[in-house]
C-alpha cells in the first residue's frame, strides 16, 4: 500500500488492512477544516471529501480531523472493494473498552448512536459490545483502586503450532529443554520480588493467571515449585480466580492436576483449537481430537472450571467443519468457550501462506454466536491485526462463570504484575470518570535473555514503585 500523505498514517494503514487493500494507493489530506481521500485500486479510483466539524461530545479528546479522514477513506474503500468491515473505522484492540467508557459517561443509547453513525460499526457488533458491557458490570463493581492481578509466563510448549507468534520454545528441542531448570530458578526469584513490591504498596491480589506457552509442559515438581512460590509471597485472601493454562492435551496428566488442585487452582484452560484431526495435524499438533476428549474428562473429574479455546479459519478447516467443532464444545459443557478469529502474525509459520476470506467466516461466527447464546453470554472481546474478515476474539461464559482476569486485562481495569520471559507488567491507575494512567514495564522476551540479563530485569521492577509514588 502507498500513502501519499503521512498525516495519521498509522490509523489509515490499519484501515486499509481491514479492507485487505494492501495494493491500494491513497492520497490523504486533513486539516481543521476539511478531509479528503482519493484511493486507487485495481485500475479504479474513488474519492471522498468531507468538512471537519467539532467532534461529538462523546469523543471530545479525539482529533476530529482524524475521524473524518477515516470516514472518507472508509467510503472510498467500501466503494472499490464492496466490503464493509463490521467494526467500521475502529482499528484498535479494545472496542468494548471504548463502548464501556462512553456508556458510563453518556449512556448506552447515545453510545450506540455514536458507534453506528460516526464510527460505522455494524448493528451486530454494537449489540455484542453492549452485551459484553452489561456482563462485565458485576466484576467491575468489585474492582478497587488497590486491586491487581498476577501473570506468570511459561514460554515452553510440546511443539510450536503454525499459527503461534508467542514467545514459546518447544521442549523437544534439547537446547530449549536445558534452559528450563535455570529459568524456573529465576522465575521464582522474580515472583518473590513482585510479591515484596505488592506488599510494600498494599496491593490486593484479585486473580492469578499462569500462561505461556503451555505451563503444563513443565514436570509436576516444577509446577509445584512455582505455585508454592506464589503461595508464599502473595496474600491470596481476596483472590477470586486462579487459572493455569493446560492448553495442550498432550501435557495433561493426573500428577500435574494433583499439583494444581493442591495449590487451590480453580480454573484450567484446555485449548483444542479444533476437534478435526486433519486441522490439528495441519497446525502441528501431535495429539488427536480423541486425546482432547480424554484430557477434558480427566480435568472434569478433578472439579476444575474449564475454558476451551478455538480458532476460526485455521488451515485445512472450513466454516462447516468449525461449526461442528463448536457444536461438540457446547455439548461438552465447559464453563467458558473462547472463539478466536485467526490472525496471521509475522512471527508465525503461517505468515508466508495466503489466506483469503470471502465473508463465509463472518457468517459462520454470526451463526455460532446465536447458537452459543442459548447457554452462554459474551463477556469480553478484543481484536488482533490481520485477523480474518477484521473479526474479533470473544470469550463466552455460562452464568456466574465470567473470567475475572480476562476482564481486568482486556478492559485495563487495574494493574497486572507480570513475571517471566515476554511478560509485560501493565500499571494502571484511575478509571470510571477519572483520567486513566497506564504504563508498561517490559521483561526480556526470550528465556535465554531473561536468564542472562536477570539483574537488569529486577532493576526494572523499581518502575512499579516509582509509578505508584508519582500518583499518590
Image (tube, rainbow, N blue to C red):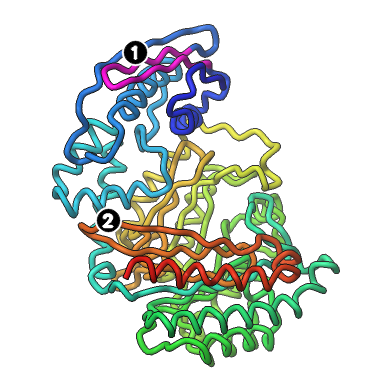
At horizontal 40% and vertical 58% (from top left) the residue drawn is 438
Q: Secondary structure at mark 2?
A: loop
Residue 41, compared with residue 58, is above or below; it is: above
Q: Which mark is first along the chain, 2 or 1?
A: 1
The stretch in magenta equals 25-39
Residue 309 position, x and y percent, is: 51, 61
46 or 285, which is in the foreground?
Answer: 46
Q: Quadrant of the C terminus?
A: bottom left
At horizontal 67% and vertical 86% (from top left) the residue drawn is 220
Identify residue for label 2.
Answer: 435
Residue 273 position, x and y percent, is: 57, 57
Q: In the displayed image of the protein, which residue is found farthest to the right?
A: 174
Location of residue 293 by image quarter: bottom right
Identify residue for label 1.
Answer: 48
Q: Quick one: label 2, few (<14), some, or many (20+) residues within 10 Å?
A: few
337 or 415, which is in the foreground?
Answer: 415
Amino acid at each position: 500500500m502507498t500513502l501519499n500523505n503521512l498525516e495519521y498514517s498509522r490509523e489509515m494503514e490499519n484501515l486499509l488492512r481491514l479492507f485487505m487493500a494492501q495494493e491500494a494507493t491513497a492520497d490523504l489530506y486533513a486539516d481543521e477544516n476539511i478531509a479528503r481521500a482519493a484511493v486507487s485500486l485495481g485500475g479504479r479510483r474513488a474519492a471522498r471529501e468531507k468538512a471537519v466539524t467539532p467532534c461529538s461530545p462523546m469523543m471530545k479528546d479525539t482529533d476530529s480531523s482524524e475521524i473524518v479522514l477515516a470516514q472518507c477513506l472508509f467510503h472510498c474503500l467500501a466503494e472499490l472493494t464492496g466490503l464493509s468491515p463490521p467494526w467500521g473505522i475502529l482499528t484498535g484492540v479494545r472496542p468494548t473498552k471504548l463502548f464501556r467508557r462512553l456508556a458510563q459517561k453518556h449512556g448506552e443509547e447515545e453510545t450506540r448512536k455514536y458507534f453506528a453513525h460516526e464510527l460505522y460499526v455494524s448493528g451486530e457488533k454494537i449489540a455484542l459490545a453492549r452485551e459484553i458491557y452489561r456482563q462485565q458490570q458485576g466484576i467491575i463493581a468489585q474492582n478497587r483502586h488497590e486491586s491487581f492481578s498476577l501473570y506468570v509466563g511459561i514460554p515452553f510448549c510440546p511443539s510450536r503450532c503454525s499459527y503461534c507468534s508467542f514467545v514459546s520454545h518447544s521442549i523437544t528441542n534439547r537446547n530449549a529443554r536445558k534452559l528450563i531448570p535455570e529459568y524456573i530458578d529465576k522465575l521464582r526469584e522474580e515472583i518473590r520480588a513482585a510479591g515484596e513490591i505488592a506488599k510494600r504498596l498494599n496491593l490486593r491480589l484479585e486473580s492469578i493467571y499462569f500462561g505461556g506457552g503451555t505451563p503444563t509442559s513443565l514436570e509436576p515438581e516444577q509446577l509445584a515449585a512455582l505455585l508454592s512460590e506464589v503461595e508464599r509471597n502473595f496474600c491470596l485472601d481476596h483472590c477470586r480466580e486462579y487459572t493455569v493454562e493446560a492448553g495442550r492435551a498432550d501435557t495433561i496428566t493426573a500428577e500435574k492436576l494433583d499439583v494444581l488442585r493442591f495449590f487451590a487452582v480453580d480454573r484450567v484452560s484446555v485449548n483444542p483449537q479444533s476437534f478435526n484431526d486433519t486441522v490439528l495435524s495441519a497446525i502441528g499438533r501431535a495429539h488427536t481430537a480423541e486425546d482432547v476428549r480424554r484430557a477434558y474428562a480427566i480435568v472434569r473429574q478433578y472439579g476444575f472450571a474449564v475454558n476451551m479455546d478455538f480458532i476460526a479459519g485455521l488451515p485445512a478447516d472450513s466454516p462447516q467443519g468449525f461449526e461442528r467443532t463448536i457444536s461438540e464444545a457446547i455439548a461438552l459443557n465447559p464453563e467458558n468457550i473462547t472463539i478466536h478469529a485467526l490472525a496471521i502474525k509475522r512471527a508465525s509459520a503461517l505468515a508466508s501462506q495466503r489466506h483469503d476470506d470471502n465473508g463465509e467466516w463472518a457468517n459462520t461466527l454470526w451463526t455460532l454466536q446465536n447458537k452459543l447464546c442459548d447457554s452462554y453470554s459474551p463477556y469480553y472481546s478484543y481484536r488482533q491485526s490481520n485477523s480474518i474478515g477484521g473479526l474479533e476474539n470473544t470469550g463466552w461464559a455460562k452464568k456466574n462463570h465470567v473470567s475475572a482476569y480476562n476482564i481486568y486485562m482486556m478492559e485495563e481495569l487495574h494493574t497486572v504484575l507480570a513475571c517471566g520471559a515476554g511478560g509485560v507488567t501493565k500499571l494502571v491507575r484511575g478509571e470510571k470518570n477519572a483520567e486513566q494512567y497506564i504504563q508498561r514495564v517490559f521483561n526480556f522476551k526470550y528465556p535465554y535473555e531473561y536468564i542472562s540479563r536477570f539483574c537488569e530485569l529486577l532493576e526494572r521492577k523499581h518502575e512499579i514503585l516509582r509509578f505508584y509514588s508519582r500518583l499518590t
